[in-house]
Amino acid sequence: MKEERNKKSTISKFTNVILNILIGIFSVILVISIYMGFQIKILKNDYSNFFGYTFFETQTGSMRDEINPGDWIVVKITKDVEIKDVVTYKQDDDFITHRIIEVYKGTYVTKGDANNTKDEPIDESQIIGKVVKVLPNFGIIRKTIFNQEVILALIIVIFAFN
């Protein structure tokens, strides 16, 4: 009998630890998303600045294999870029992430790794920064986690285990 209670207690402790970890991860993602939304929607910034870094979700396959649609990229906000760096820049109302292939006196020529043609030259002022990290499929994970049904299910599970 005592052995059975110990087993249930161990399982309960393990479940609580896992739930606490998931709540922590969920909370961090939520805080970052709220902070980014505040900077973009309330402060009307073009992109968020999170301690010198910003995040973008890739929409196209122009950098396929290295960066795929649905991946999130972490971009260090900087103008210090060179040939072969993957950079994010703003052109009109779009943010584009491509590799620098040529440099000419303050202008840069970029090209998507999966594209056949070069892009039009861009000015240094258009560059947001260089990609320092790719979070594969994070856009899909974020959309799933912040789905209303998933949030409701998480709340129910938390209350059920407590």
Image (cartoon, rainbow, N blue to C red):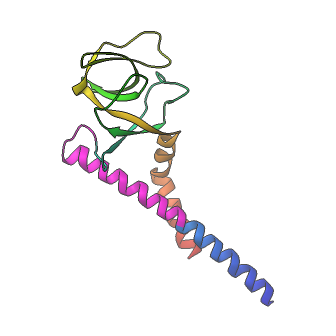
x then y, percent, for residue 86: 41, 28
Magenta stretch encompasses residue 44: yes
x then y, percent, for residue 87: 37, 29
x then y, percent, for residue 119: 36, 14
Task: Answer yes or no: is residue 127 visible.
Answer: yes
What residue is drawn where x is 56% and y is 26%?
A: 65
Q: 137 or 54: nearer the eye?
A: 54
Point out the stretch of residues depicted in magenta. 21-47
Name the magenta segment's main secondary structure: helix
Quadrant location of the C terminus in the rendered image: bottom right
What residue is drawn where x is 81% and y is 89%?
A: 1
Q: Is residue 136 left or right of residue 56?
A: right
What residue is drawn where x is 41% and y is 27%?
A: 85
Q: 106 or 140: nearer the eye?
A: 106
Residue 46 higher or lower than 16, as above or below:
above
Residue found farthest to the top: 117
Residue found farthest to the left: 43
Q: Is residue 55 left or right of residue 137?
A: left
Residue 7 higher or lower than 92, as above or below:
below
